[in-house]
Amino acid sequence: MSEALVAELVDRLAGQAGPIGRRLPPVITDKPEHRTSKGARTRARIVAAAAQRFDEQGYHGTSLQEIAEAAGISKATIYHHFKTKDEILVEILHTLMNRILDRQRGRRQDEQQSGAAQLQGMIGDLIGLVDQHPAHLRVVLEQVRHLPADVQGELEQGRERFRTEMRDILQIGAASGEFVLDDDADTVAVALLGACWAYFWHPPRSSHDARRLADTVTGIMLQGLRPRT
């Protein structure tokens, strides 16, 4: 992976918004450097390099030494931030989930955001991962099965938080008269989240960029949710 690509991924990861509400916890040790800007950037650099390597070579086919080389750091530096390779994979999972959940909670706290606006924002964020963090997304969807059972439980908790956020959006829209739900909100939430699974269908470097795809998906969904006249 080129230095330019690593730097771009690090900037995206290290520059994410701070926590809003309850977040999935990052995997950290008690080392003070993890609370510094330099420590955060090094940690993000490790995660970005690991995601790319896991994506290219598979989880079991990637060593910590290879991650260190891809990140341009020593293997010892990795151990300052992560005790095991499993912890890095968990961090990739948390990075993606927190990115979406933080943004949605921010929209929910904004009283000016209608149900339709929140729905559009969340769909845009979910589909946007295809362009913004493609390696991270593939790793989460394809490699997390290698994690221990207790971490698999964390993944299910994350899925449940996504379902809860989508359900809350639908209930906000239904309460304001924006949406009409033909089924219970939980069932509709699962259906809408399933429609956002563009990772499998969206080819790399497609002429249909993620934003355009998100707008199309949102338009189709809103047409089905709006009150009939």
Image: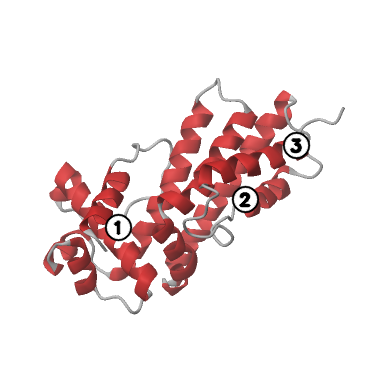
Structural distance between the alpha carbons of marks 2 and 1: 26 Å
Say above or below: 198 vs 143.
Answer: above
Residue named by callout 2 = 193
Question: Measured from the top left, where is residue 37 in percent x and y?
Answer: 17, 42
Quadrant in which residue 102 is drawn: top left
**Front label number (2 vs 1):** 1
At numbered mark 1, what does the secondary structure look like: helix, strand or loop? Answer: helix
Question: Measured from the top left, where is residue 119 in percent x and y?
Answer: 61, 36
Structural distance between the alpha carbons of marks 2 and 3: 16 Å
Instruction: Determine contact: label 2, label 3, CB under 8 Å.
Output: no
Residue named by callout 1 = 48
Name the kind of residue labelled 1 in the image. Ala
Which image quarter holds the C terminus?
top right
Residue, far right: 229
Say above or below: 177 vs 206.
Answer: above
Question: Measured from the top left, where is residue 105 in percent x and y?
Answer: 49, 35
Dot placed on the residue nearer the N-terminal end, 1 or 3: 1
Image label count: 3
The numbered mark at residue 223 is 3
Please report the residue visible at 59 percent of the width from the left and 30 percent of the height from the top: 117
Please report the residue visible at 53 percent of the width from the left and 30 percent of the height from the top: 108
Name the kind of residue labelled 3 in the image. Gln
At numbered mark 2, what does the secondary structure look like: helix, strand or loop? Answer: helix
Number of residues whose C-alpha sits closer than 10 Å to that of mark 1, classed few (under 14), some (14–19) or many (20 or more):
many
Name the kind of residue labelled 2 in the image. Leu
Dot placed on the residue nearer the N-terminal end, 2 or 1: 1
Structural distance between the alpha carbons of marks 1 and 3: 38 Å
Which image quarter holds the N terminus?
bottom left
Say above or below: 124 vs 152.
Answer: above
